[in-house]
Amino acid sequence: MLVSSEVIKESGVQFGTSGARGLVEQFTANTCAAFTHAFITSIQSQFEFKQVAIAIDNRPSSPAMAQACAKAVQQLGLEVIYYGVVPTPALAYVSMQNNIPCIMVTGSHIPFDRNGLKFYRPDGEITKADEQAILNTAAEFKAVTDLSELTVCDKAAVQYIERYTSLFDSQMLKSKRIGIYEHSSAGRDLYALMFEALGAEVIALERSDEFVPIDTEAVSDADKQKAKNWSKDYKLDFIFSTDGDGDRPLVADENGYWLRGDILGLLCADSMNIEALAVPVSCNTAIEMCNRFNHVSRTKIGSPYVIEAFDELSINYGSIAGFEANGGFLLGSDTLVNGKTIKALPTRDAVLPALMLLSAAKENTIYELVDALPLRFTHSDRIQNFATQKSLSILAEAKEDPVEFIKKLSFSGVNVVNVDVTDGLRLTLDNEDVVHFRPSGNAPELRCYAESNSTEHSIYLVEKALREIRNI
């Protein structure tokens, strides 16, 4: 017999900001089974269920991982419902409606040589406390062998489409030309159906048979140019895309300019008349400056922290939501949209903010909606293949003397006026610029976020900071 906690520890797989992540070779059949046994065992005393749902993204390694998880579920005497390739929020939504737990096999935006597992209790995404419970659970199980094919159920896809198309008039997007950058997104077969159901003409763009690790928080220069070209060549009103598992949106306006995720989230929350927000510390300060919300709570980066903040917000506010700098929108309460109730979905979702933005832009262009916000501009990028321990060492020294650290980065003529260590190191300078460093929780990367009074200067801050970090 194997013991889940021992197998997990030996695998080297760790929880990041959203789910367990690691190299594909670390996710052996027994590692996947160990996580599954530990997850199910850790929640069985709190919930009653006889089924567990599983879905995957389009990574080459995902089907076999799903089969291993399914085998473990069956070892526990439970039934597996397999939804195949669907967006993470589609799996989470149908599972919450059925009051059963689920497992999503996905590495989100990280490279295809890595993968991951996301876990959802019957009441939603697991917390950081749940993660520790999974790691500490010593569930005994038999080694997993003889993986078998799984039969796909289409219920998750059908309910996900219905969730959104039912909110709006079927002609809301009439005369709109919408491009869908499909690449290898888990939801690429669903999005055209949604937009067409609302009256839009849809143009499919660049579907890929190979996995494409789209990072909505660090859009490549190539993808920026593609959007501008597509917008012009196809006369598009809007471009929609997501990361690998379909929980982070990437949308472009009428001119082919990709919106920052937190600006999209702000506009969505405003359009939904949300009273209180929970957002990570890395999000744009225009959220507070626009004065459109009764309360804004700032959290560590990662959807579990945003979700944890919902409990406190729900005491005083009727409509609550959250979003991240990467664009994922989390609906923390049942909310009225067009006189219809949309149920809470406290996990990142890509579709809701896109549709709410299009709804808000019926009277104005998307460009005009963005232009009406306070003029604070953000940019982010990362150094890839940068050892986490190296990042932690640099930031530990920087926290000891932030002023000296700014000098090492060759930022001259400025002083540090605020130091925020909520997550990483976030420095506010006396010229109102913000520079924020944080090791990624999902991969060996050092991320840098900057905010300034112009797009050009925020880009300059990030490029300069990361260049000097490499020298350090």
Image (cartoon, rainbow, N blue to C red):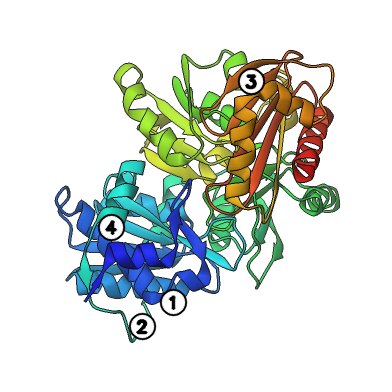
Q: Image point 46% across, 16% down: which residue?
A: 295
- Residue 39: image tag: 4
**Depth order, front residue of 323/395:** 395
Which amino acid is tagged 4?
A: Phe
Q: Which residue is drawn at 31% across and 72% down?
A: 70
Mark 4 vs mark 1, foreground winner is 4
The amino acid beneath tag 2 is Leu
Give the CA distance from mark 3 to mark 4.
39 Å
Q: Is mark 1 on a helix, strand or loop?
A: helix
Mark sitting earlier along the chain (4/2) = 4
Name the amino acid type tagged 3. Answer: Ala
- On residue 286, the disc is 3
Q: Is residue 261 left or right of 33 when viewed as pictured?
A: right
Local SS, label 3: helix
- Which quarter of the figure is the N terminus placed in? bottom left
Please name the residue shown 31% across and 65% down the image: 6
Tag 4 secondary structure: helix
Dot 3 and dot 1 residues touching (CB under 8 Å): no
How far apart are the two marked residues, 1 and 2, measured between alpha carbons? 7 Å
Q: Residue 198 at x, y = what percent?
A: 56, 47
Circle 1 residue = 64
Q: Which of marks 3 and 4 is nearer the N terminus?
A: 4
Q: Do the residues labelled 1 and 2 touch (CB within 8 Å)?
A: yes
Q: Earlier in the sequence, mark 1 or mark 2?
A: 1
Q: Which mark is residue 77?
A: none
